[in-house]
Image: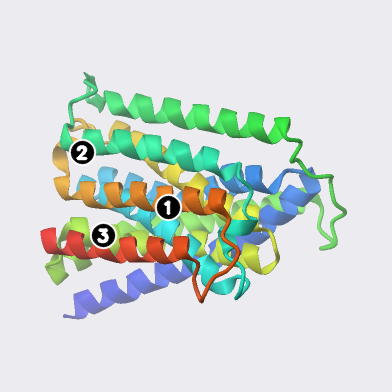
Amino acid sequence: MNTILLHIIGFIVVTVIIVISGSRLSKYGDIMADMLGWGKMFMGIILMASVTSMPELMSGISSVTILDAPDLAVGDIVGSCAFNILIISIMDMFYNHKKPLTTDAETGHIIAASFGIMMLSMLAFTILMPDIFGTIVWVGGFSLLFLVLYLIAIRVVFLYDKKNNHSLEKKNNSHGLTLKQVVFKYALNALLLMGAAMLLPFFGKTLAEASGLGQSFFGTLFIAASTSLPEVVVSVAAIRIGTIDLAIGNVFGSNIFNIAILSLDDILYTKGPIFLFTSPNHIIPVLGTIVITAIGIIGIVFKAEKKWKLAIDTSLILAVYVLMMGLLYYKT
């Protein structure tokens, strides 16, 4: 009992560290973007997304290399992808009480969202047929495809941002910090976040076994929610200061980065392609995430003018997410 309590406390402590360091990371990342003159959409999809996804990166690495728990690593990734889209609903709650969040979002976000759907669809095929793309030594062929698609997505987003002239003028730094100081603080908080994320799956695996819920459900819901907290903090903070595109870019960018993380997890897991050792139940959050991502795209394109508490699109995202978690629990 004492051991379980210690693991609960440990889980809470590392989650708090992730939230705090992630919040500070967003602050210095935003300052860095202003000093360098980067566009908010590009910054959200590329820089902030890769940084706020560090918990998923480190959790996956420690799960497959230290804990020998590939199912926990995959559950964290697919659960985080689902939770990231749910963040759009969370942001909508904090946004203008009369105007839907996605109404003010740049349509360019559809690029990252569409790449997310493509990569999630490939992931679904891989979960159902782990050897569908073949094997190179112990690494699944799907890993190479995920990495290639991620690099293509980054390139397309960059070209779109450049073509539409969305990069910003460099702004004067009102925080009294030099670029070197900002980079240092940014890197320091990144290291804190990574260190905490390394410990997360250790506590998570023990709690999953003790709870009897299983690694698939626990990894998808609890660990995914906690490792996605940096995205929540960054996104909510961004909409409060009016940078909608930074917030939404962070959400969609995190998802394509998360799926690329599975490639690294697969490479580090030397027993064979990682999906040969994971539960097929992961197909539930993957398919659910495809649906709610599509709903998000519709919301950005349609641009509804009114809402009540939540817009129609963000309400549907919330409803599908709850249904998805219910189905996953039922199947566990």
Which is nearer the eye, 18 or 249?
249
Q: Could you say whether the residue bearing mark 2 is in a helix, strand or loop?
A: helix
Q: How many marks?
A: 3
Q: Position of residue 257 (x, y in %)?
A: 46, 41
Residue 295: which numbered mark, if any? 1
Q: Which comes sooner in the sequence, label 2 or label 1?
A: 2
Query: Dot 3 surroundings within 10 Å: few (below 14), some, or many (20 or more)?
Result: some
Q: Quadrant of residue 256?
A: top left
Amino acid type, callout 1 = Ile
Q: Position of residue 81 (x, y in %)?
A: 38, 51
Residue that appears at 36% across and 24% down? 144
Can residue 290 be seen in the rendering of this structure? yes
Question: What's the CA distance linking mark 1 and mark 3?
Answer: 15 Å
Q: Which residue is mark 3?
A: 324
The residue sitting at the right extreme is 172
Q: Could you say whether the residue bearing mark 3 is in a helix, strand or loop?
A: helix
Q: Which residue is mark 2?
A: 127
Residue that appears at 22% across and 21% down? 135
Q: Position of residue 253 (x, y in %)?
A: 51, 45
Can residue 229 be seen in the rendering of this structure? no
Amino acid type, callout 3 = Met
Q: Which comes sooner in the sequence, label 2 or label 3?
A: 2
| 2 or 3: mark nearer the eye | 3
Q: Position of residue 192 (x, y in %)?
A: 52, 59
